[in-house]
């Protein structure tokens, strides 16, 4: 069942289209992230969903009820939504319990019901023992959990989160990503999450909407998005990748350091043309000797960095100016200047538009 529907949504500022023709349907209980670089239109889209901004085109509907058009916008307080901002917006003069219960008080719930809901949510977010503390007495993660509790306790139709982890340090962000997903699984509230952090989107989302220049580039689950990007932008934005540009001539695929039968790439059209591929660093093998496969070439290590969980190498194929990034096991050690062989699995490369047509 559709919970939230965006249809041809657009927002312009003068002659600039910040959001253009965005259409998206969220199912009941789905967690969807809007992901993209600064200025891609994701926060503008979220603000239109929240009712803070009127669309220039298209419509927004919740449970089949249209709540936003260029002509009319239902006010934010009448949408049954909750929103969490980067700053958390927790009132410093209220205790944890008073902050979380504020929405229940506004809705004038019976006292017994309000107390039941408050006790339940504080227990779920592990803040029950801090109910009488003030925000200044809490850590950043505890404040964030308090903001989540306040948003969830009123049982909103849709939960909106605008880069809620951007103010936290790296370790705490990782913990809170898991916390947000845990709370979503517990309450199954339809959620729209805005972030520019690929890791946040990948670990929390059922689906990810990748945006660029105000438009949707691709909507997919995290695994499909990473393994089968449909554009050069998505391939480069989701995780790290190498772009190998070349051509097909007479049924032969010519890439930096390689010339192989084009038919070896599953599903590849073999007609003559320029071509590009996305090749993830962790899908490339690195060897001290010739592995003896058609999809291998000799090269030299020109850079390396040890990142704890893996070695990050830059390898230059012999006779080319290309620089290919390869990620290997921490035990797979090669010195700068070492002669190596790279091997590529043709089943794990993805065709993308070549650089001149991207």
Image (spheres, helix red, strand yellow):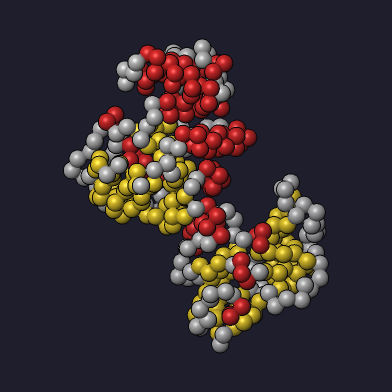
**Up-down relation of residue 52 to residue 349 (above or below):** above
| Left or right of 210, for residue 170 | right
Q: Residue furthest left?
A: 71
Residue closest to the eye, 192 or 114: 114
Residue at the spot 34% in from the left edge and 47% down from the top edge: 2
Residue at the spot 48% in from the left edge and 18% down from the top edge: 119
> How far from the left and from the top, in percent, is residue 151?
42, 28
Residue closest to the eye, 301 or 267: 267
**Up-down relation of residue 356 to residue 228 (above or below):** below
Residue at the spot 29% in from the left edge and 51% down from the top edge: 7
> How far from the left and from the top, in percent, is residue 67?
25, 40
**Up-down relation of residue 185 to residue 265 (above or below):** above
Whether residue 259 can be seen here: yes
> How far from the left and from the top, in percent, is residue 104?
37, 20
Residue at the spot 44% in from the left edge and 55% down from the top edge: 219
> How far from the left and from the top, in percent, is residue 272?
51, 83
Q: Quadrant of residue 322?
A: bottom right
């Amino acid at each position: 069942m559709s919970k939230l529907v965006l249809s041809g949504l657009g927002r312009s500022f003068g002659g600039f289209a910040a959001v253009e023709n965005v259409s998206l349907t969220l199912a009941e209980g789905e967690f969807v992230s809007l992901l993209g670089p600064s200025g891609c239109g994701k926060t503008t889209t979220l603000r239109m969903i929240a009712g803070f901004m009127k669309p220039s085109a298209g419509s927004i509907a919740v449970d089949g009820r249209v709540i936003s058009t260029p002509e009319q916008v239902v006010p934010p307080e009448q949408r049954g939504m909750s929103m969490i901002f980067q700053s958390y917006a927790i009132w410093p003069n209220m205790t944890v319990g008073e902050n979380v219960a504020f929405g229940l008080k506004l809705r004038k719930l019976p006292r017994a019901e309000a107390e039941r809901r408050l006790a339940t949510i504080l227990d779920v977010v592990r803040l029950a023992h801090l109910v009488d503390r003030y925000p200044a007495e809490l850590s950043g993660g505890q404040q964030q959990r308090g903001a989540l509790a306040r948003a969830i306790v009123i049982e909103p139709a849709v939960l909106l989160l605008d880069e809620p982890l951007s103010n936290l340090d790296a370790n705490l962000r990782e913990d809170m990503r898991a916390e947000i997903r845990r709370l979503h699984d517990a309450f199954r509230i339809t959620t729209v999450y805005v972030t520019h952090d690929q890791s946040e989107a990948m670990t929390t989302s059922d689906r990810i909407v990748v945006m660029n220049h105000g438009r949707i580039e691709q909507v997919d689950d995290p695994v499909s998005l990473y393994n089968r990007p449909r554009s050069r932008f998505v391939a480069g934005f989701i995780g790290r990748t190498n772009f190998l540009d070349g051509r097909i001539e007479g049924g032969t695929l010519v890439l930096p350091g390689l010339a192989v039968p084009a038919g070896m790439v599953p599903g590849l059209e073999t007609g003559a043309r320029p071509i590009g591929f996305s090749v993830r660093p962790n899908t490339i093998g690195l060897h001290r000797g010739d592995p003896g496969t058609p999809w291998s070439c000799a090269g030299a290590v020109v850079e390396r960095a040890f990142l704890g969980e893996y070695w990050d190498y830059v390898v230059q194929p012999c006779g080319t100016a290309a620089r290919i990034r390869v990620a290997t096991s921490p035990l797979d050690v090669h010195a700068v200047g070492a002669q190596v062989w790279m091997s590529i699995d043709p089943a794990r490369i993805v065709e993308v538009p070549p650089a001149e047509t991207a």
